[in-house]
């Protein structure tokens, strides 16, 4: 029978030495370059750890549990008298393991840092003492200014060199004027403790300075001013505490909600409940320019266009994704219900909390600014208007909308929430065509709903190439150049009906121009607290 103490000592030593060997700390090159200070600290650390472990290990006493073998089967025996390694051998084994790990942790650089720690801690701190200025390195002497030849004097200089003229006269070279360097600004007088100043003298100097400052101010007036400031802060204490609460809890800085009467393209799954749904910024960061859709991808098209317009990073500055929420499966009269009873409908949709948090945060910022004015201080910049930080919109697919060549534009009206007017915009479309040039209509309709109409998309002054100029079978590559100027947002939609042209169509060029124009118009209307 072998005692568990001996087995444990051997196992711990093997594991520690193996870890040190795997890190390369037991190589001869590494050990040969260890300094005397590093070796001393390694031995000191290993001895201290061994002393702490041996106090509970007690290698002089045999183990109460032993490991025995019945044939080839190991067995644990309790209350036995096993064989143990001598206590000195166990200590040597443990010391070897602890020293191996100490070699990994304590290098020459670490030992030098520990050795210099008392000196660094005892050095005077710049925050407590006036340290002498570092000597300024004397700059090298400035080179002489360059010689400038006078313009229009080439013939005079040529004549002087040939000996036809004795002097150059007004054509003599001039020295360039070197701007004088202004002297360095004077250093402020240091009022901290001098390096050779006794502590009592420094304390007396600080006390006398404080008393001199106190006697220069009328104490009654100072107390009255302090009491007045305190009363003013008490009057605004609710706003101050609410502002701190918003900062700590991370309440939203803006709230923009969009209701769409289409099914959610990403319904929650069991996996999302455990791992969490992907962040919207990750989902929208790198969207495909022009995916291939099917007739059943209406909701995916709306989500894709919404992400391209606001959050795709390839088009420049983006909006904050955390400030936007899409409410799928909305009723067809969602905006009518919002206009009739805004608070009740927002509460039923789970949007009231974020809207109220943004409105309250803005209200608190205004009150804090008023507090600064009351105290005679410079107030902070005013927060954006309510229309910039809160918006409610509805994008409704309504087959009953008037069937006209031009779809009706969005309509808007203000609604009141907790005393603040919030904009409500609504857009009804006939249908969504995911195939062909159908996504272009979604781009135009959503951009008009969010940022207002853009008159440049109907500009047809540019010549539109004809299909017969691009689609013939002869020299097709040479005929693709007109597609670079065939902007589909300005009427050149026919290439999207040809699958062979869609694969080569320069969507990056035309989408970038359209979305850049939209963001320039839209982001100017939006802000964050």
Image (cartoon, helix red, strand yellow):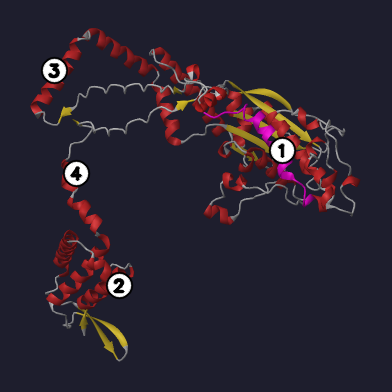
Q: Which residue is mark 3?
A: 208
Separation of marks 1 and 2 at Cα, in angstroms: 68 Å
First along the sequence among labels 2 and 3: 2
Q: Residue 416, position in %: x, y?
A: 62, 22
Q: Nearer the viewer, mark 3 or mark 4?
A: 4
- What's the magenta region? 502-529
From the image, tell me which residue sits under label 2.
Answer: 18
Q: Mark 2 and 4 residues: CB-CB less than 8 Å, in contact?
A: no
Q: Residues within 10 Å of mark 4 (few under 14, many from 20)?
A: few
* Mark 1 or 3, nearer chain start: 3
User: Mark 2, mark 4: which one is toward the viewer?
Assistant: 4
Q: Earlier in the sequence, mark 3 or mark 4?
A: 4
Against 525, residue 40 (above or below) is below
Looking at the rendered structure, which numbered label has been put on residue 331?
1
Confirm or deny contact between disc 1 and disc 3 (CB under 8 A): no
Counting residues from the start of the chain, the first of labels 1 and 2 encountered is 2
Q: Is residue 418 magenta?
A: no
Residue 378 placed where, x, y %? 42, 16
Along the line of sight, the residue nearer the viewer: 162 or 426: 162
Instruction: Name the residue: 20% across, 71% down.
Output: 96
């Amino acid at each position: 029978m072998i005692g568990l103490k001996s087995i444990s000592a051997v196992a711990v030593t093997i594991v520690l030495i193996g870890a040190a060997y795997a890190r390369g700390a037991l190589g001869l090159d590494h050990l040969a370059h260890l300094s005397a200070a590093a070796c001393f600290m390694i031995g000191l650390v290993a001895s201290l750890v061994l002393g702490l472990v041996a106090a509970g290990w007690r290698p002089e006493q045999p183990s109460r549990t032993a490991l025995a073998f019945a044939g080839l089967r190991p067995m644990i025996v309790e209350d036995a008298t096993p064989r143990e390694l001598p206590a000195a051998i166990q200590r040597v084994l443990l010391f070897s393991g602890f020293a191996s790990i100490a070699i990994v942790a304590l290098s020459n650089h670490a030992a030098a840092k520990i050795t210099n720690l008392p000196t660094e801690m005892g050095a005077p701190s710049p925050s407590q003492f006036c340290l002498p200025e570092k000597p300024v390195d004397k700059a090298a002497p400035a080179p002489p200014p360059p010689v400038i030849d006078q313009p229009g004097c080439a013939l005079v200089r040529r004549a002087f060199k040939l000996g036809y003229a004795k002097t150059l006269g007004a054509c003599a070279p001039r020295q360039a004027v070197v701007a004088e360097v202004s002297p360095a600004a004077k250093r402020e007088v240091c009022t901290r403790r001098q390096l050779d100043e006794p502590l009592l003298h420094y304390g007396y100097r600080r006390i006398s300075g404080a008393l001199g400052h106190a006697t220069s101010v009328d104490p009654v007036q100072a107390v009255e001013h302090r009491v007045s400031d305190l009363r003013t802060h008490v009057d605004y204490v609710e706003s101050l505490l609410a502002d701190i609460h918003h900062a700590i809890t991370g309440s939203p800085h803006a709230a923009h909600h969009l209701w769409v009467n289409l099914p959610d393209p990403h319904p929650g799954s069991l996996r999302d409940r455990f791992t969490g749904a992907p962040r919207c910024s990750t989902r929208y960061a790198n969207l495909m320019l022009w995916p291939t859709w099917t007739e059943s991808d209406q909701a995916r098209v709306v989500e894709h266009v919404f992400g391209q317009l606001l959050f795709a990073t390839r088009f420049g500055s983006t909006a904050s994704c955390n400030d936007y929420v899409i409410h799928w499966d909305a009723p067809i009269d969602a905006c009518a219900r919002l206009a009739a009873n805004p608070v009740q409908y927002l509460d039923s949709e789970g949007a009231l909390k974020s809207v109220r948090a943004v409105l309250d945060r803005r209200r608190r910022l205004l009150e804090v600014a008023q507090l600064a004015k009351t105290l005679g201080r410079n107030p902070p910049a005013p927060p954006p208007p309510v229309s910039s930080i809160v918006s409610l919109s509805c994008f409704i697919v309504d087959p009953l909308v008037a069937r006209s060549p031009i779809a009706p534009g969005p309509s808007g009206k203000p609604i009141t929430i907790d005393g603040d007017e919030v904009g409500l915009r609504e857009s009804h479309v006939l249908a969504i065509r995911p195939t062909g040039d159908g996504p272009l209509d979604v781009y135009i309709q959503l951009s008009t709903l969010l940022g207002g109409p853009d008159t440049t998309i109907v500009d047809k002054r540019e010549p539109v190439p004809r299909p017969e100029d691009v689609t013939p079978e002869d020299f097709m590559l040479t005929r693709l150049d007109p597609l670079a100027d065939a902007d589909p947002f300005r009427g050149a939609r026919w290439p999207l009906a040809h699958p062979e042209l869609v694969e080569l169509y320069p969507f990056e060029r035309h989408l970038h121009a359209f979305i850049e124009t939209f963001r320039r118009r839209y982001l100017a209307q939006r802000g964050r607290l």
